Image (cartoon, helix red, strand yellow):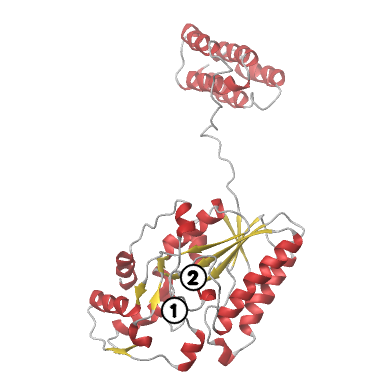
Amino acid sequence: MLPFAINAVLKGQYILQKLCTSDLKKYLKQGAEEMRNCFMLLVFKSSFIYCNRLQQKRKNMTLDIINRAIKQPQTIEQLSKETDCADKINPEKSQPLETPKTLNFKKPIISVFGSTGFIGSNFCHFYKDEVIKISKNDYETKSQNILYLISTTHNNNVFTNPHLDIDTNLKILLNVLEKCKDKKIVFNFISSYVVYGDCKKAASESTVCHPKGFYSITKKCAEDLLVSYCKTFGIVYRILRLGTVYGNLENKIADKKRALSYFIEEIKNNRPIELYYYGKMIRDYMHINDMCRAIYLVMESAPLNSVINIGSGIPYQLKDVIYQLKTIIGSHSKINLCSAPEFYKITQPKDIVLDVNKLKLLGFQPTVTFEEGMMELCS
């Protein structure tokens, strides 16, 4: 008798969970058949009567009582007292029901274009249950929420392949946009601080841009292309201009294209370091963990059809950063402060720090200090 009763209770509980969304009479008959010859039949019947009598706002309380009765069997008198108390609820004054914690609603899925790069791979790692990695040469989005990171990363391609920045930053973007124009898409486009060019004060989203170099110019051109296309075909968008990002996985891309990684490798090997502009270059740094959190927050709550800066808002002079890295590592590298080569002056902004007031208004607070980030990067 006991095994049968346990089995009936479990099946009965499943039927009861259907009560708020299905035909009550249908599941009453089925539930009664499953639970006959079991003491829980009384609980089932009384709960059915209770569900029928209460308004929609009180159904959640019914299921709560039943579930507790199944887990910890009570007498019918005890159960009746609880249902009598529930009957006294004034539906007009009762609060809206909370979503049951047991229900696992699907989270928004983000189609990530450029998931193998430094930022993309980290973002997909942190939010692995909410992303779809779009493979290379696939221009079709798999969801309504797009995070677009496909891009070149530096200005040096002009010497080896001058078409690369145009093909990557503009042509591929247009191919993806073409697949979006008949869909309800939110297009989150990752841009960069380099679109601003040289700035004497913190660059806000409304600062006039003066990009330098093929990479920087095509990034700004991509922004303009995106805005024009989205307005033409009714696509909503956000443009996220990121500061200088650094973090753990940088050591896998340690070359001159990622300055901090390159400097750390040189310092670890006690090799001499050359700092252009006599080390007085200013940059806005943010750890990759905070960058991913900020990107997610912007996608979740920033206004549509807008531009937003993502960075620390704190200016760091390059020579101070390098001396700090040298101290952490205990290196004997010689630091040479020198003027910048002509190509560097043509293509790289000397000073840039971002105005991040918009980001702060969304409630963002960084969790990794620059000192902590440097320690991690050197470990």
Task: From the top left corner, tell me how far across and down residue 213 is, in percent.
Answer: 55, 84
Query: Foreground mark, 1 or 2?
Result: 1
Task: From the top left corner, tell me how far across and down residue 40 is, in percent.
Answer: 54, 14
Disc 1 marks a residue whose amino acid type is Arg
Disc 2 marks a residue whose amino acid type is Phe
Q: Give the left or right position of residue 197, taking residue 143 as reference.
A: left
The quarter of the image holding the C terminus is bottom left
In this figure, which residue is indicated by the disc labeled 1?
258
Q: Disc 1, disc 2: CB below 8 Å?
A: yes
Q: Give the left or right position of residue 355, taking residue 273 as reference.
A: right
Task: From the top left corner, tell me how far across and down residue 274 is, in percent.
Answer: 34, 89
Q: Residues within 10 Å of mark 2 (few under 14, many from 20)?
A: some
Tag count: 2
Q: Which residue is found at the position 67% from the left and 67% from the top?
A: 226
Q: Give the left or right position of residue 244, taking residue 138 as reference.
A: left
The image shows residue 278, relative to residue 137, as above or below, that is: below
User: Looking at the image, which is closer to me, 180 or 281?
Assistant: 281
Farthest top residue?
Answer: 77
Q: Which residue is found at the position 56% from the left and 55% from the top?
A: 299
In this figure, which residue is indicated by the disc labeled 2?
118
| Distance between the alpha carbons at the discs numbered 1 and 2 | 10 Å
User: Looking at the image, which is closer to me, 23 or 314?
Assistant: 314
At mark 2, the secondary structure is: helix
Q: Residues within 10 Å of mark 1 (few under 14, many from 20)?
A: some
Quarter of the view holding residue 221: bottom right
Q: Which mark is residue 231?
A: none
Quarter of the view holding residue 232: bottom right
Task: From the top left corner, tell me how far across and down residue 61 is, in percent.
Answer: 53, 21
Q: Which residue is found at the position 61% from the left and 81% from the top?
A: 165
Q: Which callout, 1 or 2, points at the residue further toward the start of the chain?
A: 2
User: Looking at the image, which is closer to me, 377 or 293?
Assistant: 293
At mark 1, the secondary structure is: loop
